[in-house]
């Protein structure tokens, strides 16, 4: 078992980038040196719904930080979400989120094990 070295990762060092999924991502922590999990901030603009997708072999948790929206996970219909809510998405489960508010929807996406592009599956 590999131990993770102590570190401090600065949000200022995590530039935001757009994705084909229709959201913007800032990866706060995603490293081979810490394979147990990754943490990213996602931003969805008002009126936008992300694309249906799933993650193979990865559990994802959305921690809603700001804004209002609806999330669809698996076969569940749209469920309203807001600050403080946590959405748990099992591996391989289809998912998308919609910003139903007037301001940006911000949430942390916490993946275990860490997110890798190979795990991402486009479902549209």
Image (cartoon, helix red, strand yellow):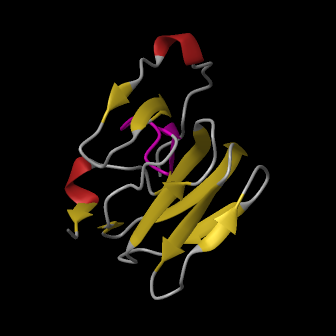
The answer to whether residue 10 is seen in the rendering is: no
Q: Tell me the quarter of the image containing the C terminus.
A: bottom left
112 vs 79, left or right, is left
Q: Is residue 73 visible?
A: yes
Residue sitting at the far bottom: 75
Q: Position of residue 4 (x, y in %)?
A: 54, 36
Residue 54 point in image, percent of width and height: 33, 68
**Where is 74 relative to 100, above or below?**
below
Residue in the image at 73% along x and 55% along y = 82
State the residue at coordinates (42%, 34%).
Answer: 25
**Is residue 46 found left or right of 51 in the rendered image?**
right
State the extent of the magenta-drawn residues as a range.
31-45
- Name the residue located 59 percent from the left edge and 56 percent from the top edge: 62
Residue at the (32%, 31%) spot, across then down: 18
Q: Position of residue 26 (x, y in %)?
A: 46, 29
Residue 102: quadrant of the picture: top right
Q: Where on the picture, by quarter, is residue 74?
A: bottom left
Query: Residue 6 location, x and y as percent?
Result: 62, 25
Taking the image as shown, residue 100 lies to the left or right of residue 95, namely right
Q: Nearer the viewer, residue 6 or 110?
A: 110
Q: Number of labelled discs?
A: 0
Q: Residue furthest top?
A: 12
| Figure check: 77 above or below 64 | below
Q: Nearer the viewer, residue 96 or 49?
A: 49
Q: Is residue 106 above or below residue 116?
A: above
Magenta stretch holds residue 24: no
Residue 42: say if magenta: yes
């Amino acid at each position: 078992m590999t131990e993770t070295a102590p570190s401090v990762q600065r949000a200022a060092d995590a530039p935001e980038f757009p994705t084909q999924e229709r959201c913007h991502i800032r990866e706060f922590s995603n490293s081979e040196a810490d394979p147990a999990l990754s943490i990213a901030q996602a931003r969805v603009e008002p009126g936008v719904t992300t694309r249906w997708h799933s993650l193979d072999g990865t559990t994802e948790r959305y921690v809603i930080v700001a804004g209002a929206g609806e999330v669809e996970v698996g076969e569940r219909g749209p469920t309203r979400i807001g600050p403080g809510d946590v959405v748990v998405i099992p591996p391989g489960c289809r998912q998308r989120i919609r910003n139903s508010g007037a301001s940006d929807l911000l949430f942390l996406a916490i993946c275990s094990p860490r997110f890798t592009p190979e795990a991402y599956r486009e479902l549209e």
